[in-house]
Image (cartoon, rainbow, N blue to C red):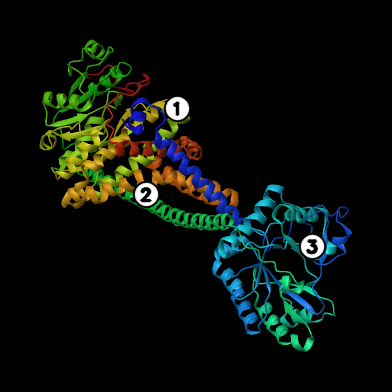
C-alpha cells in the first residue's frame, strides 16, 4: 500500500505533505538566495554609519601605499612604480558600458583591472571571459557590493568568498585582489574597515586595493574634468578609481579614450594593478572551487528563472482572478435582472397576491437520505412537512446506528414516510427514495437541512420550462455565529451562489447541492438515477443531466438552511470529500469537453471553470504565499502590502455585492481580511490533499458529518403538516 493510500486511510502524515513541505522550503530558500543576490545590492547606496575610530589602523596602512597586504604576521603596502597609473574600474560588469570601455582599451592596447561584483558577473559572464581573453586583470568587489565594515563576519565571508567562487566558475581563476565597496584612500580607513580588510586577507588570502586618484566619474562632472584628473599626476605611481557600472558611464568612456590618447606625451603608462607593482595576481582555481563556482552560478540562474516564471504566473493569476470577479458580478446582475423581469411579467398577468410564479402546482416527492442524523432530523422533517406546497416526504434511514428512524417515526406526520434499509451509502438511499416517490418532481434534501414554508413552491416553478431537468436552490448557513461560521457563510453567499448565477446564465451548472435540489423523475430515469461512482454524487448526477441534454438552473429565492462544520477538523473532512468527489466527477465526465450542445457547454465552460478556479489556482496558492513573504522581505513591503490591500478590497466589494443580491446583512464581512490567513490556506491544502488522493487511486467511503442540533424550524412552520 502506498504512503498516500496509508495517509488517506489512517490520517497519518503522507509522503506528499513531506514532499510539499520540501518543495516549499526549497522554493523559499531559492527565493531567499535570489532576493539576497538581486535585491540587497549596495551599488549606488550610501554606506551605513560605522565606527569612525582609527586607533586600530596600523600606521603602515594609513600612511602607506594603496595596495595593502595584511597576510601573515606583518602588514605590507605597495605603490605603483613611478610614471605607472593602474587603471581600475568598479561596479561592473555592465552590459552597456563595460563593452565600450573594453573597446577603448583594446583600441589603445591598454590593460586595466576590473573589480567586479558577483551578481553582475553571474548576469554577464561573457564580459568576464572577454576581460580575461583580452589580458585584463580581474579583482572582486564582493558578491552584492555590500559594505564590509558594517557586515557581520558571516556575511563578510560570504561576500568575499562568494565573489571569488563566481569568477572561478566563469574563468577557472581565483581573484586575489579585493576592493571593499565604499572605501577609497588609505587615510579614510576606519577601525571597522581595517578589521574587514584584515579578515579577508586571513580567510581568503586577498590583497586590498585602494585608490590614490578618484576620477570623479561617478558623479558625471564632464569628460574633460575626468580626463584632467587622470592626467594631472606627478612622477609617483597612482591607482585611478573609475567605474564601468552603476549608472550612465558615457563620460567615463569619452574621458578614458582622451586620456589614453595622451599617455605617450604625458609620460604616463596606464596598466593593471599587478603589472604596476610587478606582481602576477592570477591564481589558478582548484577543481573544487571551479565546480562550486559553476554550481553556484547555475543555481542563481535557476532561481532567477523561477522568480521570473512565478512573477508571470502571478500576473496571469491576478488578471484571471480580476476577470472572474468582473465576469461573475456582471453575470450575477444580469441574472438578477432577468429574474426580476420574469416576476414583474407574472404580476402583470394578475399574480399580485404573491409575486412568485405559480405555473407548477403538482405535488412533489421530497427525499431525505439519513445516516445517524438524530441531532437534526426532527427539525428537518418538520420544516419540509410544513411546506406550503403539497409534498410527500420520504425519509430513507440508511442503516443508522442512532435513533434517527425512531425519531422520524415518532413524529407521526401524515405526509411523512419512513424507509429503513441496510447501510449502502447516500446514492443507494437516494435511489431507494426515488423508487418510492409517487410524483413526477423529486426534491432531494440532506438530513441536516431545514426549509422555509415556501421553499418547495419557489424551487420547482422553473419546471414550467420543459427543457429544465434540475433546479438548484440557495443554501444558507444556519450556525453562522463565530468566526468559522462567518467564514463559511461568506463562502456560501459569495463563492457558491455567485458562481451558480454564472453557471445558470452560461448553461453549464456543474452541481445541484445535496442540501436543496429539485429534479424531474423523467430526467433521473434517463441517466440511471444517482450513481455511486464518485464521492460527490450530487455533482456527478448534475453533470450527467447536462450531458443528457437537460438544462440545470438556479433559483436564488428558494432557500434552505443547513448546518456547517463547527470545527476545523470537521470542515477539513467535509471539504476533502467535496473536493475529491468533484475531481472524480470531472474525470468521469471529461468527455463532455469534446461534445456538442448542452454537454459541450458543461465540458468547455463548466469543467474549464472548475479546473481553473477550483483546482489549478488553489494548487498555485502556496507559491503565492511564499512569494508574498519574499516580496515583504526583499522587495518594497509598502508596495506589496498595497497590492494585497487592493485585492482584499476587490474581494470585499464582490462580497458586499453578493450579500446585497442575497439580501444578507453585511456584518460578517469584517472577517474577510482574517479569512486570508487561516481559511484560505486550509482550502488550498484540501485541494492538494484531494489531488494527491485522486492520483494515488484511493477510493474514500461516504461518511456523515458531525451534527450539532443547531437547526430550528423556520418561524411559522412549527406545528403545520
User: Which of the 4 image quarters holds residue 38?
Assistant: bottom right
**Position of residue 414 in the picture relative to residue 255 (left or right):** left
Q: Residues within 10 Å of mark 2 (few under 14, many from 20)?
A: many
Residue bearing the label numbered 2: 329
**SS under mark 3:** strand
Dot 1 or dot 3, earlier in sequence: 3
How far across and down, in percent of the image, does residue 414 sit? 17, 15
The vertical placement of 627 against 221, above or below, is above
Whether residue 300 is visible: yes
N-terminal label among 1 and 2: 2
**Left or right: 638 in relation to 550:** right
Number of labelled discs? 3
Could you say where residue 321 lies in the image, as x and y percent from the top left?
A: 40, 51
Residues tagged 2 and 3 counted as in contact (Cβ below 8 A): no
Question: Could you tell me which quadrant the C terminus lies in?
Answer: top left
Q: CA distance from mark 2 to mark 3?
A: 70 Å
Measured in 3D between alpha carbons, the distance from the residue under mark 1 to the one under mark 2, in whole angstroms, is: 27 Å
Q: Residue at x 54, y 69 (%)?
A: 126
Which one is nearer the viewer's eye here, 629 or 655? 629
In the drawing, what numbered circle is on residue 68?
A: 3
Asked whether, in this view, residue 466 is left or right of residue 651, the answer is left
Q: Element under label 2? A: helix
Residue receiving disc 1: 481
Image vertical order of residue 124 relative to residue 342, above or below:
below
The quadrant in which the N terminus is found is: top left
For discs 1 and 3, the disc positioned in front in the rendered view: 3
Disc ID at residue 293:
none
**Closer to us: mark 2 or mark 3?**
3
Q: Relative to 134, is 285 above or below?
A: above
Q: Which quarter of the picture shows residue 194?
A: bottom right
- Is residue 565 visible in the rendered image? The answer is no
Amino acid at each position: 500500500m502506498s504512503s498516500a493510500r496509508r495517509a488517506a486511510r489512517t490520517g497519518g502524515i503522507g509522503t506528499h505533505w513531506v514532499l510539499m513541505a520540501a518543495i516549499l522550503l526549497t522554493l523559499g530558500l531559492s527565493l531567499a538566495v535570489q532576493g539576497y543576490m538581486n535585491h540587497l545590492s549596495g551599488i549606488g547606496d550610501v554606506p551605513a554609519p560605522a565606527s569612525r575610530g582609527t586607533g586600530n589602523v596600523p600606521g603602515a596602512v594609513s600612511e602607506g601605499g594603496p595596495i595593502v597586504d595584511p597576510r601573515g604576521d606583518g602588514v605590507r603596502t605597495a605603490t605603483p612604480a613611478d610614471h605607472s597609473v593602474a587603471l581600475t574600474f568598479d561596479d561592473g560588469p555592465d552590459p552597456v558600458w563595460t563593452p565600450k570601455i573594453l573597446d577603448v582599451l583594446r583600441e589603445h592596447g591598454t590593460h586595466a583591472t576590473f573589480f567586479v561584483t558577483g551578481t553582475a558577473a553571474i548576469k554577464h559572464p561573457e564580459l568576464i571571459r572577454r576581460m580575461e581573453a583580452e589580458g585584463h586583470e580581474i579583482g572582486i568587489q564582493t558578491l552584492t557590493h555590500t559594505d564590509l565594515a558594517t557586515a557581520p563576519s558571516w556575511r563578510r565571508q560570504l561576500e568575499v568568498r562568494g565573489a571569488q567562487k563566481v569568477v572561478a566558475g566563469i574563468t577557472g581563476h581565483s581573484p586575489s585582489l579585493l576592493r571593499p565597496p565604499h572605501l577609497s584612500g588609505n587615510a579614510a580607513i576606519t577601525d571597522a574597515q581595517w578589521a574587514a580588510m584584515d579578515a579577508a586577507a586571513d580567510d581568503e588570502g586577498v590583497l586590498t586595493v585602494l585608490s590614490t586618484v578618484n576620477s570623479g566619474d561617478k558623479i558625471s562632472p564632464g569628460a574633460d574634468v575626468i580626463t584632467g584628473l587622470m592626467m594631472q599626476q606627478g612622477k609617483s605611481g597612482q591607482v585611478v578609481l573609475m567605474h564601468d557600472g552603476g549608472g550612465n558611464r558615457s563620460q567615463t568612456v569619452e574621458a578614458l579614450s582622451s586620456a589614453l590618447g595622451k599617455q605617450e606625451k604625458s609620460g604616463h603608462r596606464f596598466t593593471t594593478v599587478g603589472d604596476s607593482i610587478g606582481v602576477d595576481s592570477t591564481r589558478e582555481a582548484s577543481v573544487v572551487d571551479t565546480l562550486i563556482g559553476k554550481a553556484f552560478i547555475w543555481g542563481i540562474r535557476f532561481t532567477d528563472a523561477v522568480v521570473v516564471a512565478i512573477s508571470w504566473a502571478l500576473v496571469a493569476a491576478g488578471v484571471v482572478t480580476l476577470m472572474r470577479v468582473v465576469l461573475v458580478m456582471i453575470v450575477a446582475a444580469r441574472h438578477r435582472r432577468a429574474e426580476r423581469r420574469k416576476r414583474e411579467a407574472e404580476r402583470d398577468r394578475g399574480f399580485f397576491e404573491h409575486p412568485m410564479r405559480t405555473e407548477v402546482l403538482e405535488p412533489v416527492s421530497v427525499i431525505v437520505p439519513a445516516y445517524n442524523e438524530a441531532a437534526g432530523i426532527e427539525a428537518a422533517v418538520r420544516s419540509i412537512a410544513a411546506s406550503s406546497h403539497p409534498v410527500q416526504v420520504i425519509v430513507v434511514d440508511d442503516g443508522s446506528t442512532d435513533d434517527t428512524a425512531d425519531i422520524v417515526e415518532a413524529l407521526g406526520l401524515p405526509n411523512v414516510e419512513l424507509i429503513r434499509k441496510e447501510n449502502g451509502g447516500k446514492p443507494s438511499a437516494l435511489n431507494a427514495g426515488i423508487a418510492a416517490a409517487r410524483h413526477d418532481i423529486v426534491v432531494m434534501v440532506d438530513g441536516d437541512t431545514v426549509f422555509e414554508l415556501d421553499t418547495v413552491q419557489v424551487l420547482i416553478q422553473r419546471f414550467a420550462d420543459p427543457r429544465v431537468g434540475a433546479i438548484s436552490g440557495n443554501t444558507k448557513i444556519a450556525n453562522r455565529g463565530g468566526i468559522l461560521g462567518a467564514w463559511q457563510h461568506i463562502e456560501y453567499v459569495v463563492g457558491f451562489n455567485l458562481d451558480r448565477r454564472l453557471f445558470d446564465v452560461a448553461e453549464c451548472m456543474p452541481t445541484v447541492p445535496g442540501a436543496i435540489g429539485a429534479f424531474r423523475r423523467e430526467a433521473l430515469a434517463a441517466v440511471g438515477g444517482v450513481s455511486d461512482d464518485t464521492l460527490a454524487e450530487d455533482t456527478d448526477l448534475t453533470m450527467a443531466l447536462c450531458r443528457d441534454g437537460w438544462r440545470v438552473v438556479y433559483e436564488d429565492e428558494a432557500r434552505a438552511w443547513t448546518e456547517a462544520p463547527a470545527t476545523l477538523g470537521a470542515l477539513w473532512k467535509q471539504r476533502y470529500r467535496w473536493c475529491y468527489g468533484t475531481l472524480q466527477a470531472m474525470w468521469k465526465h471529461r468527455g463532455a469537453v469534446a461534445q456538442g450542445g448542452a454537454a459541450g457547454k458543461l465540458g468547455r465552460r463548466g469543467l474549464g471553470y472548475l479546473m481553473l478556479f477550483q483546482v489549478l489556482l488553489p494548487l498555485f496558492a502556496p507559491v503565492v504565499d511564499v512569494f508574498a513573504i519574499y516580496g515583504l522581505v526583499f522587495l518594497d513591503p509598502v508596495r506589496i502590502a498595497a497590492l494585497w490591500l487592493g485585492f482584499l478590497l476587490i474581494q470585499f466589494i464582490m462580497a458586499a455585492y453578493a450579500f446585497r443580491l442575497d439580501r444578507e446583512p453585511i456584518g460578517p464581512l469584517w472577517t474577510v481580511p482574517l479569512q486570508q490567513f487561516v481559511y484560505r490556506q486550509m482550502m488550498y491544502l484540501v485541494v492538494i490533499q484531494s489531488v494527491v488522493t485522486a492520483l494515488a487511486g484511493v477510493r474514500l467511503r461516504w461518511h456523515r458529518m458531525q451534527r450539532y442540533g443547531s437547526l430550528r424550524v423556520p418561524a411559522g412552520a412549527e406545528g403545520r403538516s
